Image (cartoon, coloured by chain):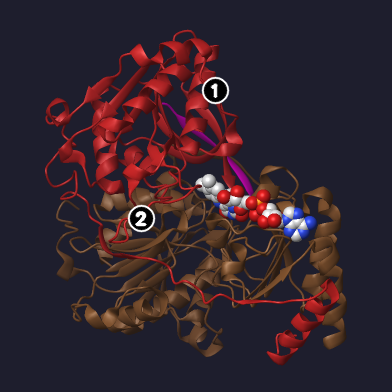
Chain colours: A red, B brown
């Protein structure tokens, strides 16, 4: 059994964000992290591996060569193999083109009856949650998103899928694709041995040359040219005029506020 | 249907909204989306159609007309009673291939975000997630930019005849806004955040005029690969953050006595005319508040008449969910926190001391 875990290296948007003069984000100036939800997908795969000797975990990512460091971290966490899909031809891909390329990579490496693909629900830089389902569509696999519990019995997976007002329990057969949310588990840290050795651990790079004969790889389905969506404009959200700081004791501030709210007919 | 070609854009017309039902009931987001769809359909001068999948749901379709739908297509089949990705994707894609709408909108619920990307991939078109603003007409878009961005519209050239759907959404956790288009393929697809679009007044005469067409897709359940074993509604108290007129949220500043702060927040919300208590993610992550109360990028987007932030620092991810509130009041013991950048009124102090005074003063002023 093989579990592919789709992982993305993302800028850490929780801290200070570097912005280019033209208003786009300067990714090179920002610290990068492994996308948080993807760590939950990784943990889910490693949990299966802990329980099944014949389970192999393959971390797969599409990104620039700088993602090498992340690939090594994934090996240090316990992945058996790490595969980075990287190439100029793939740059500028939107979710449609990205899923096309990642699906081609997985197809290239082979997907057997018992295999699964785990993704994080969404990446914090784009927040789209689209790539997982789109990979599933391109590989004609059943999908379950928002997984909070995954049970496997032979070829049958029973997954609890979170809804806003509860959950549903879904059964699908492998091979299939699951997207994971943070409620699923608590990701482990890299092992000490992993941290010490990961600098030397080899990972695989799949470039355009390696994938060009895959049926999913065509000039009009990958990269910027193959992306159906384009950025028409990006801009800064309006800066709201700074409001009014009320002054005085607690009581004075409260009375001042109440008077202003009454004047505006808010109360 | 091998002749279906998503790049033959001139063959596509009409605005469609996928309307989600659970348990045979329409979701509140459906009405927001229909209202927004009406706006776009009017800009484009075309028909607005709701697409409703379910089993025996014909009876609830006309209500969508009350919010602006000209027509509702009901795809009726026992296999569509409960959502499955497989059956729903098949039916939505078949309908799109047959009728060719120009625009297709989904609510960005857990179901909409499961279904829409799969449909977009199958239909070979683009999809923009979690939009907060939509325009088709360039004049209204430029007007929107003028009011809501730092773009100097007077000094920029816009192609006024452009009729691509302009889909605007926050990017990079709310640090930037981006307008996305899908110029070469149809339908233009987007998911729209619940709670963001304003609902029209319900018009019962329009509801009566709404045309309802029932389509029977005739699904063979034996052919389906995805089985729903059960759907469980969790018996938690329902918190209607999104629909509330007043939201009083508490953050880490309340952590030393969350129960007390929650009671104060509720009392303040009541004094302000009635509302609900929200939370920053910090308290949700700490297990002190339930996740359905979280406001922000990974929680709910709210735009109440009054939003009060108590002991919340104002991280960008929190602001992303509340900065479009009509009036914002912030209480924080540190006067230099970023929450004050979006607040109309700022009160510096200990929330446990300030809030009781606020409640007294507001009650007295009414
Ligand atoms: C990918 C991602 C998504 C996120 N999504 C969300 C989201 O959806 N929503 C969200 O809220 N956050 C979100 N966050 C987290 C966000 O970055 C902040 O960590 C969080 O909002 C902080 O919550 P807080 O303001 O309650 O806590 P803090 O930042 O700890 O602020 C507490 C504040 O309380 C004040 N204070 C302390 N004591 C008192 C007192 N007695 N009286 C008055 N004031 C007091 C302090 O001065 C401080 O300003 C997200 C983060 C990431 C990385």
Residue situated furthest front in the rendering: A248
Chain ID, mark 2 = A
Q: Residue at the spot x=34%, y=45% of the render?
A: A27
Q: Where is residue A175, by image quadrant?
A: top left
* Observer-nearest of B193 and A151: B193
Q: Residue at the spot x=49%, y=52% of the render?
A: B111
For the stretch drawn in magenta, the main secondary structure is strand
Counting from the top left corner in percent of width and height, residue B117 is at 36, 50
Residue B63: give its label: none
Would you say residue A68 is visible in this rendering?
A: yes
Q: Which residues are magenta?
A: A165-175
Residue under label 1: A189
The quarter of the rendered structure image containing the C terminus of chain A is: bottom right
Q: Where is residue A66, by image quadrant?
A: top left
Residue A19: give its label: 2
Q: Are marks 1 and 2 on the same chain?
A: yes
Query: Can you tell me whether the CB of the residue at mark 2 lies under 8 Å from the nearest atom of ligand 1?
Result: no
* Observer-nearest of B92 and B119: B119
Q: Where is residue B69, by image quadrant?
A: bottom left
Counting from the top left corner in percent of width and height, residue B43 is at 32, 83
Say which element carries label 2: loop
Counting from the top left corner in percent of width and height, residue B82 is at 54, 51
Counting from the top left corner in percent of width and height, residue B148 is at 41, 76
Q: Residue at the spot x=28%, y=56% of the render?
A: B126
Q: Is residue A222 left or right of residue B325?
A: left
């Amino acid at each position: 059994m093989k579990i592919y875990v789709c992982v993305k290296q993302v800028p850490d948007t929780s801290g200070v964000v570097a912005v280019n003069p033209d208003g786009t984000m300067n990714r090179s100036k920002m610290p990068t992290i492994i996308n948080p939800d993807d760590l939950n997908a990784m943990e889910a795969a490693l949990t299966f591996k802990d329980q099944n000797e014949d389970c192999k975990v393959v971390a797969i990512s599409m990104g620039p060569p700088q993602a090498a460091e992340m690939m090594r971290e994934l090996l240090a966490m316990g992945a058996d193999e790490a595969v980075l899909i990287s190439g100029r031809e793939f740059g500028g891909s939107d979710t449609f083109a990205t899923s096309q390329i990642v699906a081609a990579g997985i197809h290239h490496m082979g997907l057997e009856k018992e295999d699964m693909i785990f993704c994080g629900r969404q990446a914090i830089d784009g927040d789209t949650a689209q790539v997982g389902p789109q990979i599933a569509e391109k590989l004609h696999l059943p999908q379950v998103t928002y997984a909070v519990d995954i049970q496997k019995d032979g070829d049958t997976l029973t997954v609890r899928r979170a809804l806003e007002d509860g959950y549903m329990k879904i059964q699908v057969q492998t091979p299939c694709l699951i997207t994971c949310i943070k409620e699923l588990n608590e990701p482990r840290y890299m092992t000490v041995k992993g941290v010490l050795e990961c600098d030397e651990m080899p990972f695989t790079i799949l470039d355009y040359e390696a994938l060009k004969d895959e049926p999913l790889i065509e000039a009009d389905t990958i990269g910027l040219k193959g992306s159906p969506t384009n950025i028409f404009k990006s801009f800064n959200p309006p800066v709201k005029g700074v409001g009014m700081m009320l002054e005085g004791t607690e009581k004075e501030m409260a009375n001042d506020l109440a008077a202003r709210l009454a004047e505006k007919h808010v109360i | 249907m091998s002749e279906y070609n998503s790049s033959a854009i001139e063959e596509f017309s009409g605005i469609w909204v996928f309307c989600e039902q659970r348990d045979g009931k329409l979701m509140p987001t459906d009405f927001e989306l229909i209202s927004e769809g009406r706006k776009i359909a009017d800009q484009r001068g075309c028909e607005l159609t709701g697409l409703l999948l379910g089993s025996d749901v014909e009876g609830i379709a006309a209500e969508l007309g009350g919010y602006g739908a000209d027509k509702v297509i009901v795809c009726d089949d026992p296999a569509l009673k409960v959502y499955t990705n497989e059956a729903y994707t098949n039916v939505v894609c078949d309908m799109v291939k047959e009728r060719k709408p120009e625009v297709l909108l989904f609510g960005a619920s857990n179901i909409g975000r499961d279904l829409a990307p799969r449909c977009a991939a199958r239909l070979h078109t683009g999809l923009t997630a979690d939009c907060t603003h939509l325009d088709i007409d360039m004049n209204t878009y430029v007007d929107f930019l003028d009011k809501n961005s730092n773009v100097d519209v007077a000094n920029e050239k816009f192609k006024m005849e452009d009729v691509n759907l302009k889909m605007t959404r926050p990017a990079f956790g709310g640090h930037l806004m981006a307008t996305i288009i899908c110029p070469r393929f149809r339908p233009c697809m987007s998911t729209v955040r619940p709670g963001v679009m304003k609902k029209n007044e319900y018009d019962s005469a329009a509801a009566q005029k709404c045309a309802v067409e029932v389509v029977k897709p005739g699904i063979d359940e034996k052919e389906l690969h995805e089985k729903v074993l059960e759907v469980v509604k969790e018996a938690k108290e329902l918190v209607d953050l999104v629909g509330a007129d007043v939201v009083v949220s508490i953050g880490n500043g309340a952590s030393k006595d969350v129960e007390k702060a929650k009671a104060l927040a509720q009392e303040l919300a009541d004094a302000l005319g009635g509302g609900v208590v929200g939370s920053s993610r910090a308290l949700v992550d700490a297990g002190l508040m339930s996740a359905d109360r979280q406001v922000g990028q990974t929680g709910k987007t709210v735009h109440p008449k009054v939003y009060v932030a108590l002991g919340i620092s104002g991280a960008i991810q929190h602001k992303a969910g509340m900065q479009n509130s009509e009036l914002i009041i912030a209480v924080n013991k540190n006067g230099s926190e970023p929450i004050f950048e979006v607040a109309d009124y700022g009160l510096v102090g200990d929330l446990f001391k300030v809030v009781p005074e606020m409640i007294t003063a507001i009650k007295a002023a009414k």
